[in-house]
């Protein structure tokens, strides 16, 4: 509860400041980049009233775009958790090893960078609306259409199987007032299942498996065990 | 009557794959019991690649491939253009590895690469004589695991992504640059060598060797071979693939983390000698000796503790206090014996590594102690990250205590009237799992 309060205050403060910063940038860029700003205004980032500087920094030095194209732009402030699965994937590893050799002055498309960073897929080809499908066009810059289709069809099944485990646990736990059961359900839903989803999206086997499916298995059987013991006569 | 029943069960178990009309599509020991997920072809192309589903027909030269693919998949063309394959006097063009016929495209396997790199392929193949864990046997042992055969294939496709290190070379030499320098960096290993049973990433990066790498590594000359004097600190490949040797099994004491091993057996003495020679690239012999003494003593402590906990579990088993009991759990599809003689698996020799789901809660607790904390402690110690070894041992202590307390509680908890079988055999996932292999 106390956390929620602090977050509300913090987000409110960001918003007030954020709107100011965004307005300052938008006053010029609405004319210069009308499509880009219009797309941004539809984004979740805009709804959360994040200022442009969150990703681009404040120095108007010609490096504003390149800065936002790097993983650090997303990771340092907000998306550290999502980054974990990307960092362990082959994409993330190559992005680290290539380091300065990747040219972030080039737009994020056509395999201009050797491996995808956050923005390469989620803001592919400058898509500031963030609603474009990250799981199709960006992948096909390097992978065959058949691979991309098969990967996500299989990945969706992997996530759905995770949801089955959660639903089985919820059905077993229905009516249970045991706080430990509640804690385990929370872990399945918000940690392990989320890891499977991030692991599929970011092509990270470690999150799909060790931090995902076997972790779901463990909590499912622990819930069954706790509920079973309550049934003793 | 009862014997007739048993015979019927045995007959059905043996003939089920034929009766069900499936089989043939799986591979390995339990081939009859599972069918591959569509993604399988990408992870084990040698065994599962589906030829002719490409949308383009025709026979093409390398230049023609590049011309089209520069527009269709520009990333891989740009990548290849910076590779040694492209920059060689006589470039290695697409058809060399993929074939010329777009309807019969080849997904390269280690054998494909071995046509030009026979020494590396031979080194990797040599690993097979050391057994698994090894890169070369990773795929066949993955699909031969009972839990792989049992679980829905879309779920265990996650396993194949790492175990494909046996069936493709691009796990380490990522396509289409296939850079040796990239594969020498420790990050090249961490996509797979991470996570609870093998935190090789964390333990290495937290060792003195790894800290030095993290501080200075990006400025080291990674084009240099992995030889004495070329690197200021060792990395994964420097030690495990000395001089670029693609056979990674001839130094590590086999299965040292997962079961109790005598490190002073004749074979292991030879392996130790090889390690010591390697450490001598930088350290005097006494340092190596002290290091291995500490590792052996850590292992012996860990096993004393693990055996104590195994004893607790085996006592619960003999007192029939494990709920559900083995007969109340879904059996593996390939184990007809378990249907007539069900038994809870405890420890390495009984195959507990495959039994991490559909077991009782206390068995799962031990699995996590043995497979996660114990292996973490081993990796911490072996990689010279003493603090991490200590952290994992503290976790083992806590887990051993908790299992002891829980075992006592189970002895004094009434269990009558619970339909454990219904709990463990039914449910959306459990039933889906049973019907989808």
Image (spheres, coloured by chain):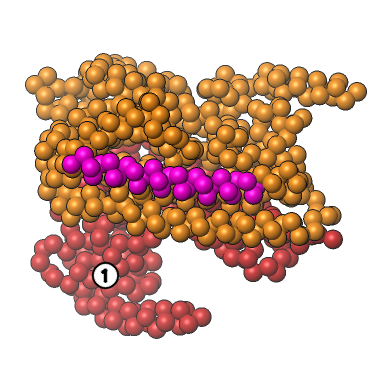
Chain colours: A red, B orange
Say which residue appears at 27% left-offset and 27% top-offset: B246
| Quarter-of-image position of residue B14 | top right
Q: Position of B408 compared to B134: left or right?
A: right
In the rendered image, the vertical position of residue A183 relative to residue B147, given as above or below: below
Q: Position of residue A1 (x, y in %)?
A: 51, 80
* Residue at the limit of the structure toward the right, as seen here: B1
In the rendered image, the vertical position of residue B391 relative to residue B213, given as above or below: below
Q: Which residues are magenta?
A: B284-313
Q: Which of the two residues, A198 or A191, is positioned nearer the viewer here?
A: A191
Say which residue appears at 19% left-offset and 52% top-offset: B212
Is residue B290 magenta-colored? Answer: yes
Q: Which of the two residues, B275 or B204, is positioned nearer the viewer here?
A: B275
For disc 1, the marked residue is A54
Say which residue appears at 46% left-offset and 79% top-offset: A3
Q: Which of the two residues, B234 or B24, is positioned nearer the viewer here?
A: B234
Is residue A179 magenta-colored? Answer: no
In the rendered image, the vertical position of residue A16 relative to residue B276, given as above or below: below
Residue A83: tell me if it is visible.
no
| Quarter-of-image position of residue B94 | top left
Q: Position of residue B99 (x, y in %)?
A: 30, 17
Q: Looking at the figure, which quarter contains the C terminus of chain B? A: top right
* Count of numbered circles in the view: 1
Residue A228: tell me if it is visible.
yes
| Quarter-of-image position of residue A65 | bottom left
Dominant secondary-structure state across the stretch colored magenta: helix
Q: Which of the two residues, B355 or B393, is positioned nearer the viewer here?
A: B393
Q: Position of residue B366 (x, y in %)?
A: 57, 49
Q: Position of residue A16 (x, y in %)?
A: 32, 83
Asked which secondary structure carries label 1, the reply is: helix
Say which residue appears at 21% left-offset and 29% top-offset: B244
């Amino acid at each position: 509860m106390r956390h929620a309060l602090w977050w509300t205050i913090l987000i409110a403060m960001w918003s007030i400041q954020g709107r100011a910063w965004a307005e300052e940038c938008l006053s010029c860029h609405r004319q210069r980049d009308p499509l880009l700003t219009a797309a941004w205004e539809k984004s979740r980032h805009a709804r959360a009233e994040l200022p442009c500087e969150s990703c681009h920094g404040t120095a108007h030095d010609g490096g504003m775009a390149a800065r936002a194209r790097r993983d650090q732009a997303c990771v340092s402030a907000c998306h550290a958790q999502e980054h974990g699965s990307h960092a362990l994937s082959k994409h993330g590893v190559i992005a680290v090893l290539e380091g300065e050799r990747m040219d972030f002055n080039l737009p994020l498309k056509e395999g201009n960078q050797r491996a995808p960073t956050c923005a390469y897929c989620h803001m592919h080809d400058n898509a500031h609306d963030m609603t474009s499908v990250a799981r199709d066009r960006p992948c096909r810059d390097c992978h065959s259409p058949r691979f991309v289709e098969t990967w996500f069809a299989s990945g969706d099944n992997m996530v759905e199987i995770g949801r089955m485990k959660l639903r089985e646990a919820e059905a077993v736990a229905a009516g249970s007032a045991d706080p430990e059961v509640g804690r385990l359900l929370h872990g399945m839903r918000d940690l392990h299942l989320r890891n499977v989803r991030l692991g599929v999206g970011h092509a990270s086997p470690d999150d799909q498996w060790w931090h995902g499916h076997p972790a779901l298995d463990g909590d499912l059987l622990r819930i069954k065990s706790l509920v079973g013991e309550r049934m003793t006569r | 009557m009862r014997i007739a029943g048993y015979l019927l069960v045995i007959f059905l178990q043996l003939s089920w794959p034929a009766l069900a009309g499936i089989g043939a599509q799986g591979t390995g020991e339990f081939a009859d019991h599972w069918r591959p997920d569509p993604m399988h072809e990408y992870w084990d192309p040698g065994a599962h690649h589906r030829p002719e589903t490409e949308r383009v027909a025709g026979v093409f030269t390398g230049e023609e491939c590049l011309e089209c693919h520069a527009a269709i998949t520009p990333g891989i063309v740009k990548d290849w253009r910076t590779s040694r394959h492209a920059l060689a006097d006589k470039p290695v063009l697409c058809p060399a590895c993929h074939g010329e016929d777009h309807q019969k495209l080849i997904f390269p396997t280690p054998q494909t690469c071995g046509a030009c790199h026979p020494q590396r392929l031979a080194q990797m193949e040599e690993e097979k004589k050391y057994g698994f864990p090894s890169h070369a046997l990773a795929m066949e042992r993955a699909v031969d695991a009972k839990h792989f055969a049992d679980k829905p294939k879309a779920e265990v496709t996650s396993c194949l992504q790492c175990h494909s290190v046996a069936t493709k070379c691009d796990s380490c030499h990522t396509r289409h640059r296939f850079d040796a320098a990239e594969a020498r960096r420790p990050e090249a290993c961490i996509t797979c060598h991470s996570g609870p049973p093998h935190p090789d990433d964390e333990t290495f990066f937290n060792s003195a060797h790894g800290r030095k790498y993290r501080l200075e590594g990006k400025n080291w000359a990674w084009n240099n071979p992995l030889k004495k004097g070329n690197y200021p600190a060792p990395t994964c490949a420097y030690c495990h693939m000395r001089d670029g040797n693609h056979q990674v099994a001839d130094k590590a004491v086999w299965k040292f983390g997962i079961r109790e091993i005598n490190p002073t057996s004749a074979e292991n003495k030879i392996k130790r000698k090889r390690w010591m020679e390697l450490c001598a690239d930088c350290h005097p012999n006494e340092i190596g000796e002290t290091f291995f003494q500490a590792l052996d003593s850590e292992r012996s402590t860990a096993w004393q503790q693990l055996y104590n906990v195994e004893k607790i579990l085996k006592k619960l088993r003999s007192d029939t206090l494990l709920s559900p009991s083995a007969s109340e759990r879904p059996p593996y599809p390939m184990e007809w014996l378990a249907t007539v003689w069900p038994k809870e698996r405890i420890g390495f020799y009984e195959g507990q590594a495959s039994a991490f789901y559909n077991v009782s809660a206390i068995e799962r607790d031990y699995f996590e102690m043995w497979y996660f904390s114990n292996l973490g402690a081993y990796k911490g110690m072996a990689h010279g990250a003493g603090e991490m070894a200590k952290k994992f041992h503290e976790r083992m202590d806590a887990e051993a205590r908790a299992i002891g307390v829980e075992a006592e509680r189970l002895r004094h908890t009434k269990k009558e009237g619970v339909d454990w079988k219904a709990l463990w055999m039914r449910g959306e996932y459990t039933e889906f799992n049973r019907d989808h292999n």
